Image (tube, rainbow, N blue to C red):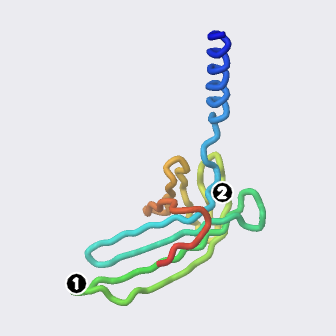
Amino acid sequence: MKRIKLMVLHGFALLLLLASCGKGPKDIAGTYASYVAGEYSISKDTLVISKYDGDGDSYQVVRNSAFQKVRNGKLQAEEHKSRTFVGRYDVDSGMLDIEATGKQIHFDLEKGTLLMMQREYKKVSGIQQVGL
């Protein structure tokens, strides 16, 4: 009886191991945020990434930015900008290529982060917009 229980337990562990192999998070859709503050400015960005037109590898990226200059130690009025892009995602390289701008977004799905140019964003949720 102990031997059967041990075999079932080993079989279950093997099944869990096989089920998890090669199956990390693959979906890049969601909201990613970045905040950078320095001596002369504060910058807040969100990237809202969602499937585009049902095509398997096309994604829409909406970038919402807020920027405040710091002059003589005082925050200036906040400036806002919103841009929308469409790109193709390559699962093997973990990169979203936005052809219209030449930008590339590199994803680290295990860490829940992305890198656009030199700026790192952290995934904060599924698809929803974060107020700036």
The image's mark for residue 15 is none
Horizontally, residue 48 falls left or right of residue 42, namely: right
Horizontally, residue 106 falls left or right of residue 39, namely: right
Q: Quadrant of residue 82?
A: bottom right
Q: Quadrant of residue 9?
A: top right
Kind of residue sitting beneath label 2: Tyr
Kind of residue sitting beneath label 1: Gly
In the image, what residue occupies the spot 52% across and 76% down?
A: 64
Q: Position of residue 131 (x, y in %)?
A: 50, 77
The image's mark for residue 89 is 2
C-alpha separation, residue under disc 1 versus residue under disc 2: 42 Å
Name the element at disc 1.
loop
Q: Position of residue 101 (x, y in %)?
A: 59, 70
Q: Position of residue 123 (x, y in %)?
A: 51, 60
In the image, what residue occupies the spot 62% across and 75% down?
A: 84
The image's mark for residue 73 is 1
Q: Position of residue 15 (x, y in %)?
A: 67, 28
In the image, what residue occupies the spot 37% across and 90% down?
A: 77
In the image, what residue occupies the spot 66% across and 52% down?
A: 90
Q: Nearer the viewer, residue 57 or 12?
A: 12
